[in-house]
Image (tube, grey):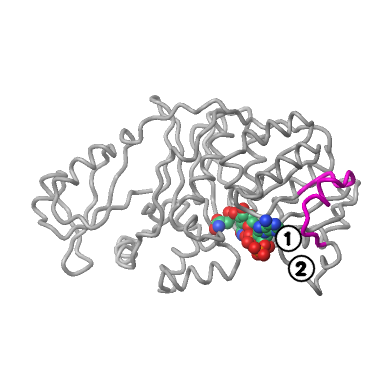
Amino acid sequence: MKIAVLGYGTVGAGVVDVLTMNKGSITKRIGTEIDVKYVLDLRDFPGTIVENIVTHDIEDILNDPEVEIVVETMGGLKPAYEFTKRALSADKNVCTSNKELVAEHGVELCQIAAEHNVNYMFEASCGGGIPIIRALNTSLRQDEILEISGILNGTTNYIMTSMYDNGETFKEALKEAQEKGYAELHPEADLEGHDAQRKIAILSSLAYGHHLDYKKVPTEGIDQIRIQDIQYAKAMNMKIKLLATSQVAEEGTWAMVSPRLVDDQNILYHVDGVMNAVFVKGNALGDAMFYGSGAGSLPTASAVCADVLDCAQHPHETLKTDITAEPLAQMPTDQVKNTFFVRCSGGESQAKQVFGITDTMHVIDGEFGFWTPEMTEKDFTKKAAQVDGIIKFIRRG
Ligand SMILES: NC(=O)C1=CN([C@@H]2O[C@H](COP(=O)(O)OP(=O)(O)OC[C@H]3O[C@@H](n4cnc5c(N)ncnc54)[C@H](OP(=O)(O)O)[C@@H]3O)[C@@H](O)[C@H]2O)C=CC1
Ligand SMILES: N[C@@H](CC=O)C(=O)O
């Protein structure tokens, strides 16, 4: 079976490495040899194992009937969207790690794949190497999913851990995450929460059987987290994690991405570095947790290759994915209940009176911190507007 890899960067090179490193065992398992016939990239890679198969022309791949699977690991929408559509329309399977494209056009691309009896597969789009998409599409189909939440971005978890454990600055930790190949080409997507926003939208759409538009997921990143916030977290024996959550409630489903304070009783407290964890609650299953490397060359490539193997075994059969264009009924986020940790430089008695609290804590000169009771987002916003000097708030996870 001949395949082509579009984009020989961190993930694309990892795919070639996995298929080379495990060639013997893969061939034995699926009964077919997988050969990378082309690598499409802007650069040449002299002196590497792909030097003789590099092309700069997508037509070489699209017009070659021998190529049955295209791996798209270029990232971004342009030209990945056009190349993917053309590959599917030419009856080629496409396996991708490009969550931006899946979140934006996944429904349409799956429909095109189905019309051509091929597959558009995206296991690597959420949680790096964690096999969460396959679990939702197969092992968990009998359950009604009530909640999905977790740490879905490796870069931000790596940064938070490095700042907390090693006292690194935000800038130093980000540089390391970039050097290790975890961060997006434009790292704002990680830092501002958009990467996790896309991932929770993809997972929720699969889990709840209705489409969650990622643009409708209220999102805050870790870009506003400062060393002072970490000082408070340490004083409370808590950690700050960027959590992506969606939950089914009576009024509809809500979803949110935001930094949250978690205590050591919360399993996510122990998920550090580039590791991701996805918690799933099913109405029959109860609780399940999926844990693993959330980014990086080989772990992500491992997930892409899982899709390649499925396509190689079913090259002309669309494997069922519960993906639909029908929109998910969403509960207004201002009705969602949370508990908030607030840092404030104003009057303590005012804050105590407005929020009805008695305890405050003093960790940093010139300010105090306190926990609110559980309240809706709307009530919190209303009360916070009545308190002078609020510096920052972080929700409890
Ligand atoms: N890195 C990770 O850990 C993970 C990444 N992903 C996703 O996987 C995708 C790829 O990420 P990653 O491997 O890190 O990115 P890289 O930037 O490392 O790799 C992308 C590659 O695609 C090439 N490329 C870009 N545009 C074109 C084009 N028009 N034609 C040909 N080649 C092109 C780039 O070339 P050049 O460098 O010359 O521009 C580069 O070699 C992204 O969607 C990302 O979000 C998903 C999970 C984990
Ligand atoms: N930039 C992403 C890469 C994997 O999806 C992350 O850090 O999680």
At horizontal 73% and vertical 34% (from top left) the residue drawn is: 113
Q: Could you say where residue 41 lies in the image, as x and y percent from the top left?
A: 73, 60
Query: Identity of the amino acid at label 1?
Result: Asp
Q: Are marks 2 and 1 in contact (CB under 8 Å)?
A: yes
Residue name at image x 85 percent, y 47 percent: 67
Q: Any magenta on residue 350?
A: no
Secondary-structure class at tag 2: loop
Under mark 2, the amino acid is Asp
Q: Residue at x 53, y 71 (%)?
A: 176
Query: What label sits on residue 44 in the rendered view?
Result: 2
Q: Classify residue 376 as left or right of residue 386.
A: right
Q: Is residue 188 above or below residue 327?
A: below
Classify mark 1 as within 8 Å of ligand 1 or not, answering yes or no: yes
Identify the secondary structure beneath mark 1.
loop
Horizontal and vertical percent position of residue 356: 14, 43
Label annotation for residue 244? none
Q: CA distance from mark 2 to mark 1?
A: 7 Å
Magenta range is 54-70
User: Along the horizontal axis of the image, is 316 left or right of 346?
Assistant: right
Residue 29 visible to the viewer = yes
Query: Which image quadrant shows ligand 1?
Result: bottom right
- Residue 265 image position (x, y, % from top left): 41, 52
Crowd rating for badge 2 (residues with CA inside 10 Å; few <14, some 14–19, many 20+) = some
Q: Which dot marks residue 41?
A: 1
Give how far across and how far down residue 99 sits, in percent.
59, 47
